[in-house]
Image (spheres, rainbow, N blue to C red):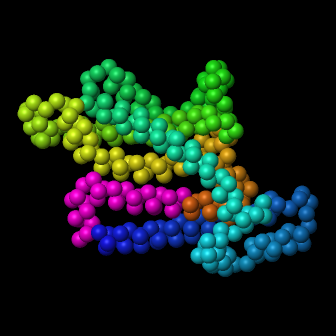
């Protein structure tokens, strides 16, 4: 197990370094942020002075070396536009994104997994067919379209919920539902497939032949053996929730990291974009590592194979 963990940690470090380098150099191809900061009609001398002050007149590899040195000291630099530490800006927006993603994850798991199990156990029930229609719709509808539709129905027509912002406790409901729809459908589909696969195995038929009720077989044996695909997809879906927050936060004017990323890209505020992308990469890598550890807890065979 220790060899497995060391190998994964090394892979994680290499991945983080690769993502950092990629986003650093690609952003430099987007244009000069200095031109967005100077007033209209500014002289070339003023532009060059500001570029020198920000360090953009130095070679790109020198800028990258300085940036990596700062990261080793947990210094993400200062915002080009706001001239305040990037860490402070990200820290002020991060709680909103965590809150939104947490509520969306609870909705996705709380609805998607039970729905998938029901569709597998009662696959000929009319509600199962209705559930399959929901799964297809959830995986097909664009996030921005479903967000606008939710605003139109529940905020404009019915007036039940606020359409934007985060000033009220209920403000999180619509963006969380919108963000969770795709993950909810994915969890339902994966859970249904996994449970159906387990229901067709000999140990289930043997248990049923002994007179055990189907509900007991499902809760005692089938759910545990079906957990690995759900755990696997859960790590990916949490990362997808964070990436999908970019669109959802823009539609609902939610003051999280997604909205901050869009604003920073438009303003070419490189340090903020780099920090947010690096944070997202770290979360994705950590979640995949956590999923691997959960595999070994659920299935001892994976634990033995990982220790080889």
Residue 64 in sight: no
Tell me where residue 15 appears, x and y as whole percent.
47, 67
Total marks placed: 0
- Tell which of 257 and 102 is nearer to you: 102
Q: Which residue is drawn at 21% across and 59% down?
A: 301
Give above or below for 261 relative to 38: above
x and y percent of residue 148 in the render? 62, 31
In the rendered image, the quadrant that contains the C terminus is: bottom left
Q: Please, is residue 285 above or below residue 68 in the view?
A: above
Q: In this rendering, would 280 be left or right of 32?
A: left
Q: Nearer the viewer, residue 149 or 241?
A: 241
Q: Is residue 126 among what the camera can see? A: yes
Residue at figure coordinates x 47%, y 71% from the top left: 13
* Residue under the point 60% across and 37% down: 172
Q: Does the magenta stretch include residue 300?
A: yes
Tell me where residue 212 sits by quadrant.
top left
Can you say whether 212 is above or below 70 in the image? above
Residue 241 magenta-highlighted: no
Q: Position of residue 51 (x, y in %)?
A: 80, 71
- In depth, the one of 269 and 119 nearer the eye is 119
- Is residue 86 toward the left or the right of residue 286 in the image? right
Locate the N terminus and report the quarter of the image it occupies: bottom left
Relative height, residue 113 to residue 47 (above, below): above
Q: Is the magenta stretch mostly helix, strand or loop?
A: helix
In the foreground, 193 or 301: 301
Q: Give the range drawn in magenta.
A: 280-308
Point out residue 182 in the picture as x, y percentages from the top left corner: 47, 39
Q: Quadrant of residue 150?
A: top right
In this picture, residue 163 sits left or right of residue 137: right
Question: What residue sits 50% from the left and 58% below the top?
Answer: 283
């Amino acid at each position: 197990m220790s060899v497995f963990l060391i190998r994964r940690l090394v892979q994680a470090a290499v991945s983080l370094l690769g993502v950092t380098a990629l986003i650093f150099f690609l952003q430099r191809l987007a244009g000069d942020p200095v031109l967005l900061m100077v007033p209209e009609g500014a002289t070339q001398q003023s532009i060059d002075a500001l570029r020198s002050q920000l360090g953009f007149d130095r070679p790109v590899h020198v800028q990258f070396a300085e940036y990596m040195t700062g990261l080793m000291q947990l210094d993400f630099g200062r915002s080009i536009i706001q001239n305040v530490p990037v860490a402070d800006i990200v820290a002020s927006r991060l709680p909103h994104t965590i809150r939104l993603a947490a509520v969306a994850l609870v909705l996705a798991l709380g609805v998607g997994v039970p729905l998938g199990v029901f569709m597998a156990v009662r696959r000929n029930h009319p509600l199962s067919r209705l559930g399959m229609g929901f799964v297809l719709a959830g995986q097909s509808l664009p996030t921005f379209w479903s967000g606008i539709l939710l605003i139109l129905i529940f905020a404009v027509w019915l007036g039940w919920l606020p359409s934007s912002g985060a000033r009220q406790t209920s403000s999180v409901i619509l963006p969380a539902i919108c963000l969770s729809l795709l993950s909810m459908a994915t969890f339902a589909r994966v859970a249904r497939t996994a449970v159906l696969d387990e229901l067709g195995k000999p140990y289930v038929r043997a248990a049923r032949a002994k007179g055990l009720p189907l509900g007991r077989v499902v809760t005692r044996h089938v759910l545990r053996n079906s957990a690995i695909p759900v755990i696997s997809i859960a790590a990916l879906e949490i990362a997808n929730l964070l990436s999908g927050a970019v669109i959802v936060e823009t539609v609902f004017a939610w003051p999280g990291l997604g909205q901050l990323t869009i604003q920073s890209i438009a303003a070419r505020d490189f340090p903020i974009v780099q920090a947010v992308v690096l944070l997202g990469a770290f979360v994705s890598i950590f979640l995949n590592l956590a999923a691997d550890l959960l595999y070994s807890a659920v299935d001892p065979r994976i634990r033995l194979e990982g220790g080889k």
